[in-house]
Amino acid sequence: MKINHISDLLSTISQYNNVRITQTFTSETKDLIIVRCIPNTTILELTFLETSTVVCYKTVEEAAGVIDFHLNNSKVI
């Protein structure tokens, strides 16, 4: 998946931050990352499923870069 498509998805999630939208990013057949927006903010919460690590990002660009890296390397923090 191209980083601009990831950014578009994250922008939509951020725009509708008063609705509970989650997006799961999968590599091959393995779910890697679940993303949601913390309600009434633009902070994106990424949950790395392999480790259950939760990390918050303030910008779409930063979160998209992290997701892109993990999708293309199939490694999770």
Image (cartoon, rainbow, N blue to C red):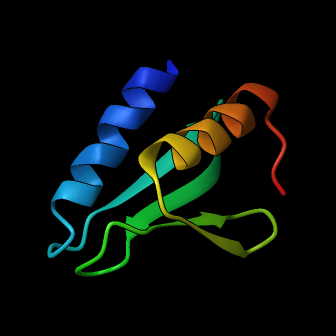
Q: Where is the C terminus found, in terms of image quarters?
A: bottom right
> In this view of the protein, can residue 62 be seen by the observer?
yes
Name the foreground residue: 45 vs 51: 45
Locate residue 45, reporting x and y percent. 51, 69
Q: Above or below — where is 39 with respect to 7?
A: below
> In this view of the protein, can residue 1 be seen by the observer?
no
Asked which quadrant contains residue 57, the reply is bottom right
Left or right of 60 on screen, residue 72: right
Residue found at the far top of this picture = 2
Asked which quadrant contains residue 6, the reply is top left
At a point 37% along the width and 78% down the height, the residue shown is 38
Left or right of 71 on screen, residue 18: left
Locate residue 37, reporting x and y percent. 36, 68
At a point 50% along the width and 18% down the height, the residue shown is 2
Locate residue 74, reporting x and y percent. 79, 35
Locate residue 70, reporting x and y percent. 73, 39
**Across the whole image, how many numbered discs are drawn on residues?**
0
Q: Above or below — where is 56 with respect to 16?
A: below
Residue found at the far bottom of this picture = 39
At a point 72% along the width and 33% down the height, the residue shown is 69
Q: Above or below — where is 50 with respect to 4?
A: below
Left or right of 73 on screen, residue 37: left
Left or right of 32 on screen, residue 9: left
